[in-house]
Amino acid sequence: MTTTRAVLLDVNRVKVSVVIPVFNEKGTVATLIDRVRAVGLRMEIIVVDDGSSDGTRDVLTSLQHKVDKLILLEQNRGKGAALKAGFALATGDVIVIQDADLEYDPQDFTDLLEPIVKADADLVLGSRVSGAKPQRAYYFWHYVGNYLITLVTRVLYNTTLHDVYTCYKMFRRSCLEGLSFNSDGFEFDAEFLAKLLKKNLVVYEVPIAYYGRTYEQGKKMRWYHTGKVLWSFLKYRVVD
């Protein structure tokens, strides 16, 4: 009990920038923002709308008092473009990526932050495949794609990570120094992680909950994205 309280005291001295890319998420974004704010950490919430066309912008405008920074991109450019815009305005000691749907639980932020404050980690990934927390059974071909992506990444970057294409990546803001990113779409995650892994950072992985959505509920990732992602991991192994 004493150890847990000590960790939380350390955690509360760290400012966390939560960067939330949003595209056509009018049904979930309000609930998500409330869940992020309820975590209770010292944080700033940065929401980047990537040219939504379903009324999400109206929802976000009404929620401006609940977020610290709201960026409205004029056109849909992709998740990577939204994240880059959010990273540019982040002022926290630590940054975490949070999708605008409800697949990931912000209550896991404290677990992600613990290796940073206790073990001097630079980058912490949340694993959806540990079985240690609730993890919805999801599409078989998504599992196959994620397995291939993870296997290739482990070989190319000499790592033992189990879930490299997870949304939850928490990292020290200083990790971005000297880096530039080319990707604007889903493959941004591959370029981002590849460039961080090449820096020989202290990397940890922790179990997280995963409440996966169906395609009918708005899930955007498709099996054919696997090829682009694999190519990005291969490409950025040799390209800066």
Image: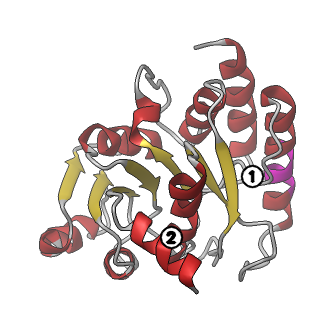
Q: Residue at x 62, y 33 (%)?
A: 201
Q: For the view shown, which residue lies furthest in the bottom direction?
A: 1
Q: Position of residue 5 (x, y in %)?
A: 48, 80
Res. 198 visible in picture: yes
Residue linked to disc 2? 7
Q: For the view shown, which residue lies furthest in the top direction?
A: 239
The boundaries of the magenta stretch are 144-148
Q: Position of residue 66 (x, y in %)?
A: 19, 74
Q: Residue at x 66, y 28 (%)?
A: 200
Q: Please tell me which residue lies in front, 1 or 152.
A: 1
- Give the side of residue 133 with respect to residue 217, left or right: right
Q: Secondary structure of the magenta portion, mostly?
A: helix
Amino acid type for the residue under numbered disc 2: Val
85 above or below 100? Answer: above
98 above or below 214? Answer: above
Q: Magenta stretch containing residue 235, yes or no?
A: no
Q: Quadrant of residue 238?
A: top right
Q: Please tell me which residue lies in front, 108 or 142.
A: 108
Label 2 vs label 1: CA separation? Answer: 39 Å
Identify the disc placed on residue 223.
1
Amino acid type for the residue under numbered disc 1: Trp
Find numbered disc 2 in the image and state the secondary structure of the residue it sits on: helix
Res. 168 visible in picture: no
Q: Residue at x 74, y 43 (%)?
A: 226
Q: Please tell me which residue lies in front, 87 or 186.
A: 87
